[in-house]
Image: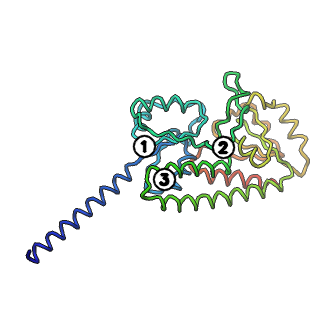
Amino acid sequence: MSETVKYILLFLLAAMFVVLTCCKTDSAQDRIITVSIEPQRWLLEQIVGDKIKVKTFISSGGDPENFDPPMSVVKNASKSIAFMKTGHLQWEETLIDRIKENNGKLTIVDTSEGIPIISGTHDHHGQHDSEPDPHIWSSVKNAIKMSDTMLAEVLKIDPVNAEYYRNNHRKLVARLNLLDQRFQSVVDSLPNPEFLVFHPSLSYLARDYDLHQLSLGSENKELSIASLKEKVKNISQNESLIFFCQPDDNQSGLKSLIQSPRLTVVDINPMSYRWDEEMEKILNAFKQNR
């Protein structure tokens, strides 16, 4: 075999290797995992980086409890290799049935696995005593458990990049553990562990850090505007009460409360993609209220 032929063969082999490598990379990029909400997407993307695409059903401005996805969204989700649900949003099971009509092999992952579920904070058709609270992502401690569940599934999907995912997960958990410690430290020093919300979406945060959530929007925890006014009025001159307001809150009847000098109003969006920034916002509110 002549030297020229050898060089040609080596060039062809090298070209084939490049083509196969590119195809493999593109295939990895085509992997899609769909999640229910944006905070899940943030968590999962910290683990998968650019190895797997992550798509979300509900945008940061959506209502997670009253969601009816259009058919186009359902069809797109059917192209996913896995659907990671929060676990207790009522529409998720119906949605899964619709997706499986197009993709019967879809892997379903419940990211609430291992998380003790709170019941009785919501009123759905008069069944508030037994309905699970779906807002598991409102607690840093829960987010750590959610990330563990996500990692376990990602390792099954793409074992080739297992070490990459494990390293990312370790970094994420280190960040979350530090945030958890900071939350506990600040909360331990609060003179008043109570806070106000319109809708009881911070129940897991309250439970995990021994806080007391007062809500306007839940039947079994409802306080009237008059009761809340009295509550604010009775706060000592050196204390204030935090009122966490969300984009979808019903503002009717709240203006008189918001005008109180003893009420610290903080706008938050628990559905935001930047879950970490929203948690920092909540933490800073407590820190400034010490």
- Residue 25 vs residue 208: left or right? left
Residue 115 is marked as: 2
Q: Quadrant of the C terminus?
A: bottom right
Residue 132 is marked as: none
Q: Position of residue 249 (x, y in %)?
A: 67, 35
Q: Secondary structure at mark 2?
A: loop
Q: Decide which of tag 2 and tag 3 comes sooner along the chain.
A: 2
Between 86 and 1, which is closer to the camera in this rendering? 1
On screen, residue 210 above or below 64: below
On screen, residue 101 above or below 279: above
Q: Secondary structure at mark 1?
A: loop
> Label 1 sits on what residue type?
Ile
C-alpha distance separating marks 2 and 1: 24 Å
- Residue assigned mark 1: 81
> Label 2 sits on what residue type?
Ile
Dot in front, 1 or 3: 3
Residue drawn at x 85%, y 32% is: 227
**The residue positioned farthest toward the front in the image shown:** 1
Neighbourhood count class around disc 2 (C-alpha, 10 Å): few under 14, some 14–19, many 20 upward: some
Residue drawn at x 10%, y 72% is: 5
> Label 3 sits on what residue type?
Leu
